[in-house]
Amino acid sequence: MQTNSNGIHTIEKKAKEDRYQHHDYYNIDELLDDDHLLARDAVRTWVKQSVSPIIEEYSEKAQCPTHLFKELAEIGAFGPSLPVEYGGGGMDEIAYGVIMQELERGDSGIRSMASVQGSLVMYPIFRFGSEEQRRKYLPKLGSGEFIGCFGLTEPDHGSNPSGMVTNIKDDGDAYILNGSKMWITNSPVADIAVVWAKDEAGKIRGVIVEKDMKGFHAPEIHGKWSLRASITGELVFEDVRVPKANILPEVVGLKGPLSCLSKARYGIAWGAIGAALDCYDSALRYSLEREQFGKPIGQFQLTQKKLAEMITEITKAQLLAWRLGSLANKGKATPAQISMAKRNNVNMALEIAREARQIHGGMGITNEYPVMRHMMNLETVLTYEGTHDIHLLITGMDVTGLNAFK
């Protein structure tokens, strides 16, 4: 018990021990290289030391632990599969996946901080930027000196990005940028934003906007019940003068932002498994410790049914992600395949979080356990970077050849 400056007694909170143990029912680790396992173990150790002891408090207060940006950089979480010379980790796509899995095991918001930085900011600058842009921005983004965000979604254009109204107009040696973006992770603390806007010909272009450019504002969005430890905001552009040197020269059209989203969705397909594993791990341990009617609740058939179905679905998702990663390493993973994995694995994780909450009973709604936080987070992950239904239609279009969006 402590006494604060007003003489009121308060309870001193102790940092909770992270007792998580990895679950690999089909020995999938045997399919991973030593580099993958080393990267995963390093990130898992960091999550246990730096994320788990504080994440419930930050989530409860709806505050982002921004001090973790630098630490994420130090453990190589920003652009793990981008070249080292440009601030990345020089690893393959499976390494990127297992890193995202471990981060989301800690919290979906922490994984979002990293995946936005690497997949939605560093990746488009690396793939579509000029060499000057790469040298100027990527090392600082990789080291965490710069924080970035990605501006595609608009208040009236979410699942239909081609309808965007944000625009740029030629003004000599610069473009004048006007418009707004919504639901942008990292935006209130970002140093740069990779923004997608239509030029005067109606073609979509990528532009790098710096935070100190006049007319650029990034107000924070408050009142979220989900991803509460992730900072989310808007991007507002009022006659922002952006030098033409800041235009991404190597892409025109929706293929630019959509390729970035494929990279991020791939990471989500892995990351959601981490959230599911954390919920399963907590539920399994609780079922062995909690007694009712003179025996552990894990001895009851219905509890065993829940746990058996959880680990079955997790195993299926692990195999799906591993195969997708193998294809990605060969450059063969299609956007439709990524959509299938993102949709399946996030939905799987959300269902497991709900079942885990039931196993925990009343305790499941408290922050003594991680399941309710994961459940709330996954409600957002289910609909961001392509909603659950949109990804279903992407698969439908791929297998039929018929476009349901038109």
Image: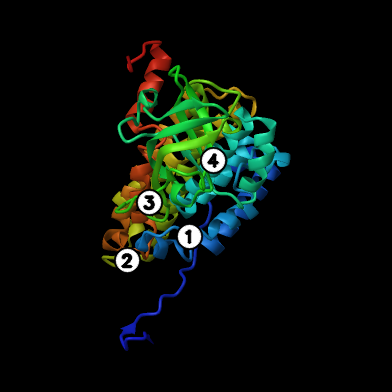
Secondary structure beneath label 2? strand
Q: Identity of the amino acid at label 1? A: Pro
Identify the residue shown where x is 55% and y is 55%: 69
**Pair 3/2: label in front:** 3
> Mark 3 sits on what residue?
220
Which label lies toward us, 2 or 1?
A: 1
Mark 4 sits on what residue? 26
Instruction: Provide residue 173's location: percent of width, then percent of height.
Output: 58, 29
Which of pointers 4 and 1 indicates the residue nearer the eye? 1
**What numbered label is drawn on residue 291?**
2
Q: Earlier in the sequence, mark 2 or mark 4?
A: 4
- Decide which of 202, 297 is in the foreground and name it: 202
Q: Earlier in the sequence, mark 4 or mark 1?
A: 4
Q: Compute the Cα span from label 2 to label 4.
A: 29 Å
In the displayed structure, 22 sits above or below 97; it is below
Tell me whether circle 3 and circle 1 mark residues in contact (CB < 8 Å). no
Residue contact at pointers 2 and 4, CB within 8 angstroms: no
In terms of secondary structure, where does tag 3 sit? loop
Residue 271 coordinates in the image, percent (x, y): 49, 43
Residue at mark 1: 65
Q: Residue at x 45, y 41 (%)?
A: 314
> Residue most toward the top?
401
Q: Crowding near pointer 2: few (<14 within 10 Å), some, many (20+)?
A: few
Task: State the CA–CA distance, disc 3 to disc 4.
Answer: 43 Å
Disc with the residue nearer the chain's start (2 vs 1):
1
Question: Relative to the observer, which residue lies in front, 166 or 239?
Answer: 239
Residue type (three-letter) at the residue carrying disc 4? Tyr
Secondary structure beneath dot 4 equals loop
